[in-house]
Amino acid sequence: MTSPAPLKPIFTIADWLARPEDLGFELVNGELVQKAQPDFKHGAAQFGLSAILRPEFHRKGGGGHPGGWWIAGEVDIRLGEDGVRPDLCGWRRDRVPEAPTGRPVTIRPDWICETLSQSNASNDTIVKMWLYHRAQVPHYWVLDPETKSLAVYRDSPEGYLNVLVAHAGETVHAEPFGAIAIRVGLLFGEDLDD
């Protein structure tokens, strides 16, 4: 008779925070998971979305801009006993009047966006999607540089409801940032029209 495999160690928030920040570890369901190292497509998509959203929403509002959000990237966030570092995330200013501080941020975001990496796409589309739903993050977006697509999810009691899938070549108004049009192809390297 063979002995059973040893149980995986269960790590804590303290273990997660003790890891070097530059290694990009996350604590998911008691396991320390290193985020995939982004390639050019991943980084360009993440930066592209940030470049579209931040000028319009990361402000109080007014002057022709909707405003009303704090938007940041690669922020360590504690969600219960889990610790994540989403590619992009945001907090509504009407709920969180001051910019979140500390490491980790302990205030649940109102929106999270993950950009898929080929090496661990299921982590973002299955494991972390479930984790974000459990934490009641109202809006979850997934950018896929391989398919040049944006998937938008809204939290519901049963799980995330897919409310939009758009590809390069399409222009959409995606909640919770529906006040502006997003040309999906710009997120994946299309040039602005001159």
Image (cartoon, helix red, strand yellow):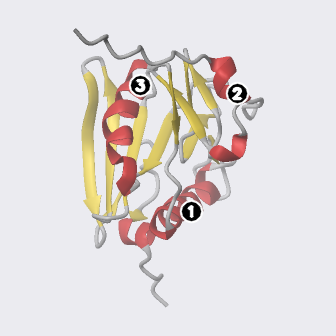
Q: Residue at x 60, y 16 (%)?
A: 12
Is 164 or 81 nearer to us in this picture?
A: 81
Which comes before the other along the chain, label 2 or label 3? 2
Does 83 sit above or below residue 166? above
Please name the amino acid that badge 2 sits on.
Leu
Q: CA distance from mark 1 to mark 3?
A: 24 Å
Q: Which residue is mark 2?
A: 17
Which residue lies most toward the front here?
1
**Badge 1 local density, few (<14 within 10 Å), some, or many (20+)?**
some
Residue 77 placed where, x, y %?
62, 30
Q: Which residue is mark 1?
A: 47
Q: Residue at x 41, y 55 (%)?
A: 117
Q: Which mark is residue 131?
A: 3
Label 2 or label 3, whichever lies nearer to me, is 2
> Label 3 near label 2: C-beta < 8 Å?
no
Label 1 or label 3, whichever lies nearer to me, is 3
Q: Residue at x 44, y 42 (%)?
A: 176
